Image: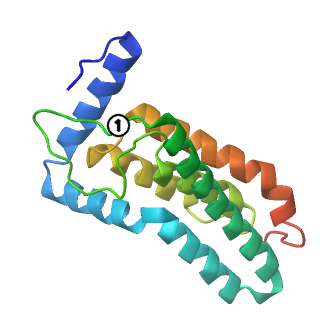
Amino acid sequence: MRYPDSAAERADHHLLAVLRRCGTDPYVAGAARALSWAGEHGAVWLAAGAAGACADPARRGAWLRATALVGTAHAVSMGVKRVVRRPRPVLPDAEPLVRTAGRHSFPSSHATSAAAAVVAFGTLLPRAPLPPLAAAMCVSRLVVGVHYPSDVACGALLGAATARLGRSWAMRGGRPA
């Protein structure tokens, strides 16, 4: 294990260690595992978009385009991971609580798809609790010990920016209910 060099890296590592210790509580660990599992490959957000398209036929096209934005944001994050290739964190006193689909940590694709869903679906469901659900998804990745806080923050920024770029296209004919 390489010790963090800069103050920013030390802070990143310290915050991860603090949040990972929250996972020693079995209820917190269970919730974090469930969120991590649900967010794998953006599944919960893609399913929410598909459900919206089925439940809201008048705005089906907007729902499908918004869901495509979430999928696009996830794909972009996977591409960035392959370029950056930052290894997953290793905490000497705490094993990760979940297995991961890949070895690379930056950016968090869970955070990317969660933030993209907030932006993409927010106009379609303005009163839904999307931001707190997305925030819980993001924090879960720290509690389970598979991302640094900077991975999550940059993933969320990437997801929000990607969805924001395509939001006007997605919302054609998708006025709020």
Q: Residue at x 37, y 11 (%)?
A: 6
Callout 1: 10 Å neighbours few (<14), some, many (20+)? some
The residue closer to the viewer here, 175 or 15, is: 15
Q: Quadrant of residue 126?
A: bottom right
**Residue at (18% x, 39% y) in the render:** 21
Q: In the displayed orientation, state which residue is furthest to the top.
A: 6
Provide residue 53's location: percent of width, then percent of height.
Answer: 69, 82
Q: Along the horizontal axis of the image, is 77 left or right of 126? A: left
For the point 24% across and 18% down, the residue is 3
Residue on which disc 1 sits: 87
Q: Which quadrant is the C terminus positioned in?
A: bottom right
Amino acid type for the residue under numbered disc 1: Pro
Which residue is painted at 44% across and 37% down in the image?
Answer: 85
Q: Residue furthest right?
A: 173
Is any atom of residue 58 visible in this view?
Answer: yes
* Residue 37 x, y percent position in the rendering: 35, 65
Which quadrant of the figure has residue 94?
Answer: top left
In the rendered image, residue 107, in percent from the top left (x then y), is placed at 49, 41
Dividing the picture into quadrants, the one containing residue 89 is top left
